[in-house]
Every structure is written in structure tokens, then in C-alpha cells.
Amino acid sequence: MLSRVAESIYWMARYIERAENTARFVEVTLNLVLDQPMGVDEPWRPLINATGDDEIFNKSYAVADAETVMRFMAFDRDYANSIISALRIARENARSVRESLSSEAFEQINTLYHYVNTAAQTEQSPDSPTDFFDSIRRHCHLLTGILDATMSHDTGWHFANVGRLIERADKTSRILDVKYFTLLPTVDSVGTAIDDLQWSTLLFSLSGFEAYRRQHHVILSDKVVEFFLLHTEFPRSVRFCVDNAETSLLAITGGATDPRHSVATEKIAALRERLASTDATSILQYGLHQFVDSVQGDLNEIGIAITDSYFD
Amino acid sequence: MSVINDPISFEHYSTDDFFDELIDANGHPRPDAAPLTEVINRLPIGDLMRRQAAIERSLHRMGITFAVYGDKSGTEKIMPFDIVPRIISSMLWRHIEAGLKQRITALNMFLDDIYNDQAILKDNVVPRDLIENATTFLKPCIGLKPPRGVWCHITGTDLVRDADGAVFVLEDNLRCPSGVSYVLQNRAVMKRNFPQIFAASKVRPVNDYPAKLYQMLRWLARDDIKNPTVVVLTPGIYNSAYYEHSFLAHQMGVELVEGRDLMVDDGVVYMRTTDGPQRVDVIYRRVDDTFIDPEVFREDSVLGVKGLMDAYRRGNIALANAPGTGVADDKVVYVYVPDMIRYYMNEEAIIPNVRTYICQRDEDRKYVLAHLDELVVKAANESGGYGMLIGPHSTKEQQAEFAVKIKDDPRNFIAQPTLSLSRMPTVVDGSLQGRHVDLRPYILHGERIWILPGGLTRVALKKGSLVVNSSQGGGSKDTWVVAEPGHTVVDTQDDQ
């Protein structure tokens, strides 16, 4: 496969996943705000903090409220990680490798882009934001299904997998951060109904509430953390993503020990090892935010190594 | 605006004394068009417009769009498409096919001749200075013998019909003719959104074009290569025909490469893949001649590949079309094509040229300058409807401007009478109105010559306009060639 094509497929998948997760971020906050006790200052602020792009936000917007945060995260063309920007970049990448995708896949990306672009052109926020963000998620799922069902599971498909899973691992960890930045009104609130509600909302935003409940029945913070970071079977947990990204990366390399490729495979193996050998208790002791932060750092380095190993 | 409440039918359609492709001078549908006009006349109110809108949505979803320049909100437009198909009878098509085969044969012999023996120049059939002074005559191609002896593998010839319905060649496009993807996609969206109208007519299919193209390209590879790698070379995503490049690569199942994906090592061409360099044997290049190799042609080209011409000369890579074919595209050289046919084939041209005045000839120039208000003046090396004066639709100022240009550089201009181009019923503002059309059939020259049944019908959507180019507000139509009586639509006669 052409290196340029591999790179474009990888980024296409990453940006689609980014758009989907941004939609999830906004949805989780919409739900949190509806359940928020009165009198909390700037309930939308934690979302901006969790993205790590608060400086960019502050330059263009005075307050973080439903209106500005939704506009920033969904429709701001000057913000590279907004849904519309991510979809524009995903589509540009898809366009440049159209011949390597199935027609159905390209049409789905195109349809999704136009759906959001049309919404972006209207001045008002979506009439029902929940429906709007929900539709984006569905569109993204449809694309993943189309790629799965209409493309040969060859090198290109594996690159799409690697891109999607690396991005997803990063974003799942950031959704967990939304909770960290959403401070409870008082220390006493830990373990209360509000605390429970917040954890469940997080699980909802990961489409993981039902899977979690089947396994653990009640909300326990360490179990939720374990579910997000260390679950081996839930497809949005960080560990699941890392395991499967590694599998795809090894499939691309085809067992050959090309030294060019080994940096990326070694780095991802190290992260997999790290996730496999820890547990929720140690993570909470170490500090949840600190742990999540260092995982994000590792994922970042893996991304750089993939570019160096395969695309240059 | 459109009146959705009135049925769209041929009842009030007028040919206005033009030659109409579907309707005869008495207002009756031509025999092959009758089933179509009947279906349209019987449609419920609003049905045709609904289907037209559905087709536009399909094209939009498929991403067959171009960006509106300078629009930051990301608005995109589709190439205008009209739902009423053009119908070509089997008899007319036989005539066109024979004429195009003859013409492309002569043009290939001409290209081989002028880059090698130059017999036609020595015999003064084509003036030597005309060829040697043409910017499209590429000196580095002198002495070249392209693989399998074919220079021009893919051609899109522009045909028009006059007030009597007679067919003429308007232009030969021998460089990188585009538009064939629209032929295939127009048919696909018509089948999806208006399947009923196919039932009554026996329409010859077009969807085997990519397979024929691939076979032809494969045939160009060196004999000792068992499983040749074919690629399509594109200038990239910002080229206006990018969609077509990507479409053809996709349909053929080959890689679409850019110049930066290729490299030449010791006269062999490779593409950069995730498994390292992989050898390439045939390139369908959609990059202009002078951009393909900065070592030989334009040094500033970033679209090409260093060393490609060297690999080509060594016979390690086949290029379609061969570099240098543009010289036969020159609008002055065009005038001599009937002479080429006579010279090389000892035949008369089956499809004539349009009467053309060569401004370099004193007598012709005088006539042209005196009749600028009647003639169409064209620059010898422009395409896409640029550098053109349409006399009857021009102002005195524009005519004066062209008079100066012609006197300054007579070699660069030709003129033709303004043809009364044939028309097609076209949906405009909720009713059927006559609009002028041309036809670009696509010719593949491999082991044999094969012509895609039909081709691209371009339609000038502005009332009275004769300019069909998409860059100038033209649209396109599905084009049907009706099967020979007694034949099935998939004919063995066109097997390559």
C-alpha cells in the first residue's frame, strides 16, 4: 500500500473518531448539567478543561455556557478539533484516497460532513442538541460498520483500525477527566446520589452503562475507573483499544522484523504491558488525573512513532 | 420560478427551426425517441422535477462536486445534470464509430511520422514550420517509438451537428481528455432514479469502460512482465478533474499516485509503499506533457517524476498517452486532419471538419477580420472555452480586441462559421426547452480501437448559448446509443 494512502486512511479514521468523541463529550455535559444542583458556577467549564484546549477557547469566548461551548466544540471552523473541523479534515483525507475505500464508505463520510455542515450554517444551536449529537454518533458507527463490511481486511483496513483505536483510547481517558474537573459541591458528596449520577452519566457517554451494570450492578468509583481504563472486552476501554491497535499494527508488519517498524510496535507493547499490570486501586492511589495524563502522553508518542515508522 | 403544478410534457415543445436530437421538424418524436417522450408525457404532475431533484441529491452524496471559490462556509455545487437523455440511433452511431476509428488511426500515424521520418512534412502535405513552431511539438520526443507503436491511447473527440443534423468534428482532444467519469455516473444515477424509462428503449451499456481501459493499459506493459502494475498519475486533490482520476483508479482497482509517490532508480519506476519500493510498469498519466519530468521538461514542475522520460526511453515504463501527442491537438493542425487521412490511408474523411479559416493565411485572415461579427474565433492552444470570441454574441469592443490579437499573432488563431448547433429538450424553469448540445465520444486505442457507445453530451443551459463547457455554465446529460435492430444491448461487435 502507498505510504501516502496509508497515512491518509489513518488520519481519516482518527478524525472521524475525534468527531464522534467530541459529540460524546458534549452529550455527557448536557446530561450532567441537567442533573446539576443549582448554583454551580460555569457547569460547562469542566468540558473545556478536559479537552486541554481551554486557552484556545478563552481567546474567542468570554463565558463557558451551553451556547458558547456547543458552538466551539461543534461548529467552530477555526478550532481544529471541533466536530466540523475534524469532519472536514477526515473528508479531505478520504477524498485523497477515495479509490482505496469502498464507495459506500466515502459516501457515508460525505453525508456525515454535509449533515454537520448544514447545521453549522444555521445561526441557532440545534433544536434538540441531544438528537443532533446522537445522530453524529450513529453516523460514525455506520461508517465503522461500512468499513468493516465492505472493505477487505487488508493493510488499509488495519491502518484505519490503528487510527480509530489510538484516538479512542485518548478520548476515553479524557471523558474520565470530565468527571475529575467536575468538582462535587462538597467533599461529603462523594458516594452520594449526585456522585452516582455523575459516574453513570460518564458510563452513558461511553455507551457503557448497560455493559457495566450487567457486570457490577451498582456504581462504585473504582469499578468505573477499572471499566474505563482496564476492561479487556469493552470496546471503548483504554486497554481494549491499545490491545487491538497493537494487533492491527502487528498485522500490518506481518511478523517481519523490519527495524523501521519496531519503534512503534515496541512503544505500544510497553503501554499494553503497563495497563495489564496495574489495577484501579493503584491508579487511584497514584492519582487518577495523573495516571490518565501519562497514558495520554504515551499515546501521543505512539502516534509519532507510527508516523515515523510507516509514513515517512 | 418553476411551475411545479403543470405537467412537463412535449405537447408545447417547439424546436424553433433548429435541428433537434429528439423531435423532428414536424414536432413528432424521432422513432428511437418515441418510447421516451411517451413515458415523460404520461408522468404524474411534479414527477419529473422530483426525480431531477433526487438525481441532484445522489450526485451530491457521491461527492461529484466542486467547491465554490472563495466561499468559507464550505458550500459545494454539483455539475449541472439534465434528466432528459440524448438518444443516438444505431445508424448514426455506426457512422460516428467508423469516422472516429478512421480519424484516430490517421492521427496516430501522423504522430509517429512527425516524431520520426517526417514524410508528411517532406511531401509538403502539412507545412513544416507549422509543426516545428508549435509549442506542443516536443523536441525530446523526436525519435521515440512508444510501446506497441501507439501514441494516443485515450481520445475524446468533440462532435457537433449542424442545422441539417450532419455530424462534424469540432476538436480533437489527444492530451488528457476528461469527462468519461460523468458518462458512467450519469448513467448510474439515471438507472437509480428513473429506471422506468430504460424499459422501453434498448440502451447500450457503458459500464465496461474501466475494464476496457485496464485491458488496454495492461497490454502496454513489456512482454516479459507477467503481472504488470498499472497506476493512474494525478496532479492531486486540487485538480479540477481529480474526481475522475480517483474514480477511474477505483473502478480499475489500481493505485492512484501523485508525483511524490513515485521515484526512478536506474531507469526503473517505483512507488513508495508501506512495504518499501514497488515496481510500476504502466502509468495512465493525467498530468500534462510538460509537467511529467522536471529533468526533461519544465524544471519547476512538482507534479512530475525525475527520470521518468529516461525510464520511458529505455522501455521500462509505458505512458498513456505518450508524451508529445498535444501537437495533434493544435487547432491549426486540426485543419489538416482530412489531408492526413488522405495521405496515410488513401481515404476521404468520413466525418468532415468544420470549415476553418487559418489566420496565418493572408486570404483567410482578411476574410476573418472582415467577418468577426459572424465567426467563432479560437486560440490555437486553449481549451475549456477560454480564449474564444463568438461573433454574433460579441460586442464591437470585443471584436476590436480580437482583431488586434489576430494581427499580432496570426499563427495562434483560427476562425469558424458560427454553427447552428443541434438542440435537445432540457428541463428549464419547470418546462421543456431546446438547448444546444455537443457530443464527446471516448476512443480507446489498444490492440484494437474501441469506442464507448455514446459519450458525454454537454448542454449549454443558458438560452441561445453555444458554449457547453462546464467552466462556462454548461451541464451534461445521459447519452443513449440504441442497440441495432435484432441485437441485444450487450453487443459482441464491440468486443476489443
Image (tube, coloured by chain):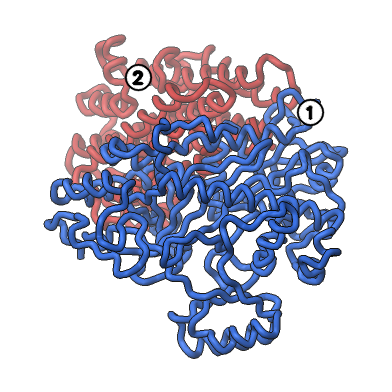
B423 and A266: which one is in front? B423
The answer to whether residue A9 of the structure is visible from this angle is no
Residue lying farthest to the left in this orientation: B5
In this picture, is B106 found above or below B332?
Answer: above
Left/right of residue B301 with respect to residue B420 in the rendered view: right
**Chain where mark 2 sits:** A
* Front-lying residue, B301 or B35: B35
Name the side, left or right, on which A282 lies relative to B285: left
Q: Residue at x 81, y 58 (%)?
A: B114
Q: Amino acid at mark 2?
A: Val
Give how far apart the Cα atoms at labels 2 and 1 are.
65 Å
**In the displayed structure, does residue A200 sit left or right of residue B272?**
left
Question: Quick check: B352 above or below B322?
Answer: below
> Residue B322 at what x, y percent from top left?
73, 48
Question: A210 or A184, which is in the foreground?
Answer: A210
Colour assigned to chain A in the rendering is: red
- The kind of secondary structure element at disc 1 is loop
Q: Colour of chain B?
A: blue
Mark identifier at residue B223:
1
Residue B191, located in which quarter of the rendered image?
top left
Considering the image in quadrants, where does the C terminus of chain A appear? Answer: top right
Residue B324 place in picture, x, y as percent: 75, 55
Q: Which residue position is annotated with label 2?
A: A224
Quadrant of the image for the N terminus of chain A?
A: top right
Mark 2, secondary structure of its residue: helix
Outermost residue to the top: A215
x, y percent for residue B398: 51, 85
> Measured from the top left, where is residue B142 in percent x and y?
85, 55
CB under 8 Å between callouts 2 and 1?
Answer: no
Amino acid bearing label 1? Asp
> Which residue corresponds to the image point at 48% horizontal and 74% vertical from the top-left?
B418
Please identify the quarter of the rendering in which residue A224 is found: top left
